[in-house]
């Protein structure tokens, strides 16, 4: 799931499959024994797109995640030449072993960005899990046999398995437009009806100012203010910005740093959930509750979804429009209702007795 709530599913299929779970049809036909698929569904469960990677033999994919810019990174294994560009272009990789590991990235519209292979002559390996940190470092875990070169670019970095199959942990970074500042931190928090952003730089070169960008969906950003930079500095500099009128629900923020010569670059994206009582029209009753919780004070025609969430952040119930929810079987404790209305997200807590 990405920061906007879109869900990405990855796996394999054979033959012809319809990847649209709704009334529409979006079919893809595999060209080999099995093809890899990547499918995107929006926060309301609507089909967005599906792509496949084709080879003449077996391909598998087990791991998918997203980075701070909404790009989709995924990993698996392949046993024959595969075109990793699901669009009209071509980007072929051929395994050196019987089954090599791949790591690939698409943008949030499904366009190909890059693909890498971790290869060994007698290898049977696969990527099983993948994670991207705030610095856009990609961590992949899985298994391999024989000897594998874990550096897909430049000088070799060979590791040999001690047993028949060993576990690997692999870290790589991909090129982004670098900020001409050393951004040590960038975060934020809700404070009542306001959102407060804080960031710290370790050094700055030719830094004129920061523009604070905000988005409701994590994709379409607009400027809401600016903060002067420190020009040239080797000292730690602290900055803050107050968004006095944030959206209800999730707000996504990004810094655009601009040099004195007009060149600019973007930071990573941070999200803040603000559901202050002043802006929240939703009323739930009773609270505390034993059997049924009633949701009121909203137009049912504008509801998109209602989710019941436990203290671990797990969604344990989801409906599109249900004013009365049975909670009698839930263990006692604190729960939240996350309600999406007209593209605004409201979060309201209640206590189950």
Image (cartoon, rainbow, N blue to C red):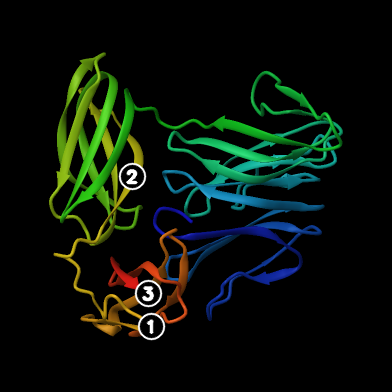
Mark 2 or mark 1: name the one nearer the start of the chain.
2
Q: Secondary structure at mark 3?
A: strand
Mark toward the viewer: 2 or 1? 1
x and y percentages locating residue 138 in the rendered image: 55, 37
x and y percentages locating residue 39 in the rendered image: 57, 61
Image quadrant assignment for residue 69: top left
- Residue indicated by mark 1: 325
* Mark 1 in CB contact with mark 3 (< 8 angstroms): yes
Mark toward the viewer: 1 or 3? 1
Image mark for residue 292: none
- Residue 339 vertical placement versus 132 (above, below): below
Residue drawn at point x = 82 percent, y = 38 percent: 165
* Mark 3 in CB contact with mark 2 (< 8 angstroms): no
- Residue 264 vertical placement versus 130 (above, below): above
What is the spatial separation of the Cα atoms under label 3 and label 2, in whole angstroms?
A: 24 Å
Q: Secondary structure at mark 2?
A: strand
x and y percentages locating residue 72 in the rendered image: 52, 49
Image quadrant assignment for residue 203: top left
Q: 350 or 218, which lies in front?
A: 350
Mark toward the viewer: 3 or 2? 3
Image mark for residue 270: 2
Structural crowding at the residue carrying mark 3, measured as other residues with C-alpha within 10 Å and reported as few (<14), some (14–19) or many (≥20): many
- Residue indicated by mark 3: 306
Q: The C terminus lies in which quarter of the figure?
A: bottom left
Report whether 238 appears left or right of 159: left
x and y percentages locating residue 225 in the rendered image: 15, 42
Residue drawn at point x = 21 percent, y = 33 percent: 210
What is the spatial separation of the Cα atoms under label 2 and label 1, in whole angstroms?
A: 33 Å
Q: 313 or 81, which lies in front?
A: 313
- Residue 299 vertical placement versus 346 (above, below): below
Q: Secondary structure at mark 1?
A: strand
Report whether 306 appears left or right of 226: right
């Amino acid at each position: 799931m990405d920061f906007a709530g879109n869900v990405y599913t990855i796996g394999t299929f054979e033959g012809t499959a319809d990847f649209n779970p709704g009334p529409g049809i979006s079919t893809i036909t595999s060209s080999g024994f099995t093809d890899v698929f990547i499918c995107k569904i929006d926060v309301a469960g609507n089909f967005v797109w599906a792509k496949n990677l084709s080879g003449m033999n077996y391909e598998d994919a087990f791991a998918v995640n997203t980075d701070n810019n909404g790009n989709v990174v995924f990993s698996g294994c392949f046993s024959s030449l595969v075109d990793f560009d699901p669009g009209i272009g071509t980007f072929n990789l051929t395994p050196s072993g019987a089954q090599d590991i791949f790591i690939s990235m698409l943008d949030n519209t499904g366009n190909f960005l890059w693909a890498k292979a971790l290869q060994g002559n007698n290898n049977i390996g696969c990527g099983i899990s993948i994670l991207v940190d705030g610095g856009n470092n990609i961590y992949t875990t899985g298994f391999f046999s024989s000897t594998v070169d874990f550096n897909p670019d430049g000088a070799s970095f060979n590791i040999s398995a001690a047993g028949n199959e060993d576990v690997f942990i692999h870290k790589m970074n991909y090129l982004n437009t670098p900020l001409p500042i050393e951004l040590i931190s960038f975060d934020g928090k809700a404070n009542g009806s306001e959102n407060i952003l804080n960031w710290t730089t370790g050094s700055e070169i030719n830094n004129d100012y920061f523009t604070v960008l905000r988005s409701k969906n994590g994709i379409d950003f607009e400027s809401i203010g600016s903060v002067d930079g420190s020009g040239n500095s080797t000292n730690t500099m602290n900055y803050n910005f107050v968004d006095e009128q944030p959206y209800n629900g999730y707000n996504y923020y990004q810094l655009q740093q601009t040099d004195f010569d007009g060149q600019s670059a973007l930071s990573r994206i941070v999200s803040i959930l603000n559901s202050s009582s002043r802006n929240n029209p939703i009323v739930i009753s009773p609270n505390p509750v034993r059997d049924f919780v009633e949701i009121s004070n909203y137009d049912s025609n504008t509801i998109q979804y209602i989710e019941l969430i436990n203290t671990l952040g797990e969604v344990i119930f989801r409906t599109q429009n249900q004013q009365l929810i049975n909670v009698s079987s839930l263990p006692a404790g604190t729960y939240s209702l996350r309600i999406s209305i007209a593209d605004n997200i409201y979060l309201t807590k209640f206590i189950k007795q």
